[in-house]
Image (cartoon, rainbow, N blue to C red):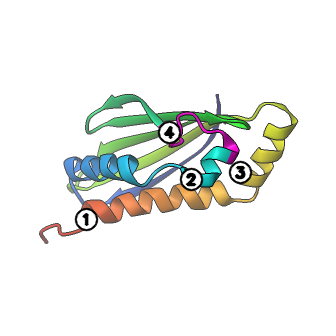
């Protein structure tokens, strides 16, 4: 698959807290579902499934639909001050004319960047919620 982009943020929380937030978010909030999933024909139906996992370090999600095959890879790294760097790398293939049109719509419009940044910021918020000062 072709590399699309990578985004990262520093989260002022331990790697264990960030990992727990990542797992919770991907299990409950990341995905397609509903009529959009039916229109796109997502496999798995939720849009993503775990392809690889190294607890506290790496989570790789994959999926496909009528217009694309895609992979989203999260990486966690400790920072010297007790914080954690969370990165999200995206990869995808967009075969055929419809795939190229879909790529223009999702990637070319900037929607993918907004979505990915929203995901990692939300995970950061979950990791720092109710955290002792």
Q: Is residue 28 above or below residue 58?
A: below
**Left or right of 72 in this view: 107:** right
Residue beneath the point at 59% across and 62% down: 114
Q: Residues within 10 Å of mark 1 (few under 14, many from 20)?
A: some
For label 4, the SS is loop
Which residue is under mark 3? 107
**Residue 65, relative to residue 8: is it above or below?**
above
Is any atom of residue 19 visible in this view? yes
Res. 79 in view: no
Name the front one of labels 2 and 1.
2
- x, y (%) of residue 60? 44, 34
Q: Nearer the viewer, mark 4 or mark 2?
A: 2
Give the mark nearer the N terminus: 2 vs 1: 2
Labels 4 and 2: the sequence-earlier one: 2
Q: Earlier in the sequence, mark 1 or mark 4?
A: 4
Please name the residue that numbered disc 4 is placed on.
Answer: 48
Residue 90: image quadrant is: top right
Q: CA distance from mark 1 to mark 3?
A: 30 Å
As helix, strand or loop, the secondary structure at mark 3 comes to: helix
Residue under the point 27% across and 59% down? 127
Read off the residue under disc 1: 128
- Highlighted magenta segment, given as a residue range: 39-48
Residue behind mark 2: 34
> Counting residues from the N terminus, which is met first, the one under dot 3 or under dot 2?
2
| Residue at image coords 24%, 68% | 129
Q: Earlier in the sequence, mark 1 or mark 3?
A: 3
Q: Is 105 on the left-hand or right-hand side of 123?
A: right
């Amino acid at each position: 698959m072709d590399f699309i982009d990578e985004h990262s943020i520093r989260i002022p929380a331990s790697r264990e807290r960030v990992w727990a937030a990542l797992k919770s978010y991907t299990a409950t909030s990341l995905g397609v579902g509903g009529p959009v999933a039916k229109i796109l024909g997502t496999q798995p139906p939720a849009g993503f499934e775990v392809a690889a996992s190294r607890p506290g370090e790496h989570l790789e999600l994959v999926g496909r639909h009528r217009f694309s095959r895609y992979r989203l890879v999260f990486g966690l790294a400790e920072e010297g001050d007790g914080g954690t760097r969370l990165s999200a790398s995206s990869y995808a293939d967009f075969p055929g004319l419809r795939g190229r049109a879909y790529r223009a719509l999702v990637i070319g419009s900037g929607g993918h960047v907004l979505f990915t940044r929203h995901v990692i910021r939300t995970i950061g918020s979950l990791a720092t919620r109710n955290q002792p000062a």
